[in-house]
Amino acid sequence: MTTRKNPSGRTPGRPVRSRGDERGRLLDVALTLFSKHGIAATPLTAIARRARVTPALLHYYFGSRERLLDALMEERFLPLLEPVRADLLAQAHDPARQIQTLVRSLFRVLEANPWLPPLWLREVLSEGGLLRERLLRGVASRIAPLLRDAIAAAQARGQINRDLDPRLTVVSLIGLTVFPFAARPIWTRLLDADDVDAERLAAHTLALLGRGLELDHA
């Protein structure tokens, strides 16, 4: 018996439409649902339903939730934050410029990706969050120690207030950048602050840091 050749040339079982944009769309849908409901409360079937694809197609691209989370870290988180790390490295000998760049870059990333702050709160800061270990092994381990060491080196050169703990300074930087976006629905309502955009937040944060770090942030 002669086996009929598949005219499309695709592997048996492979979806006809397997373009990268479809895979990327599924990642975006997953991020939206995870940030809204949490990872544990979002089964793969819910992602497939929201994306209007079959669960089999989602399984084809990712296989399991664990592999989907790995893909999110590699293809969504790292590409967003790796340029921030590159900027820190490029300005290692100018602490004022380094901190300015970090704050402005993070605010731009957070403003452009509204899924990131709630996902950070749900899945990184919360105990049992399913992205915590992945973040510690990946993004955080590439940026936080680098910034800590740069601050310590700048203190040794007399460029930054020696009374500051470099480790806690990193914590303060994260708190002054990620938290305002995570809590934005609350403070904009309480303080009648709907007019505050990312640029204004950055200017305000740098003013606070400039006084605390004794840097010229103008």
Image (tube, rainbow, N blue to C red):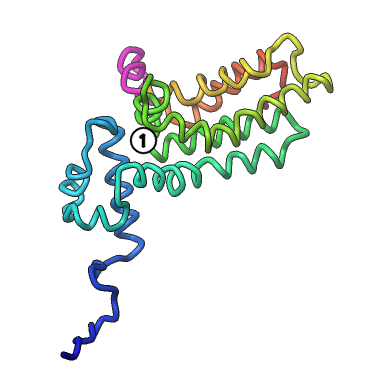
- The answer to which image quadrant residue 18 occupies is bottom left
- Residue farthest toward the front in the current orientation of the protein: 1
Q: Which of 36 and 200 is in front in this view?
A: 36
Q: Position of residue 217 (x, y in %)?
A: 67, 25
In the image, residue 112 above or below residue 162: below
Q: Position of residue 125 (x, y in %)?
A: 42, 22
- Residue farthest toward the bottom in the current orientation of the protein: 2
User: Would you say 54 lies left or right of 28 here?
Assistant: left
Residue wearing tag 1: 114
Q: Quadrant of the N terminus?
A: bottom left
Q: Where is residue 47 in the image (x, y as percent from the top left)?
A: 22, 45
In the image, residue 189 above or below residue 135: above
Q: Which amino acid does label 1 sit on?
A: Pro
Q: Image point 51% across, 31% down: which residue?
A: 136
Q: Image point 39% across, 39% down: which residue?
A: 113
Q: Where is residue 49 in the image (x, y as percent from the top left)?
A: 15, 47
Residue numbers of the magenta segment: 183-195
Q: Image point 19% across, 49% down: which residue?
A: 48
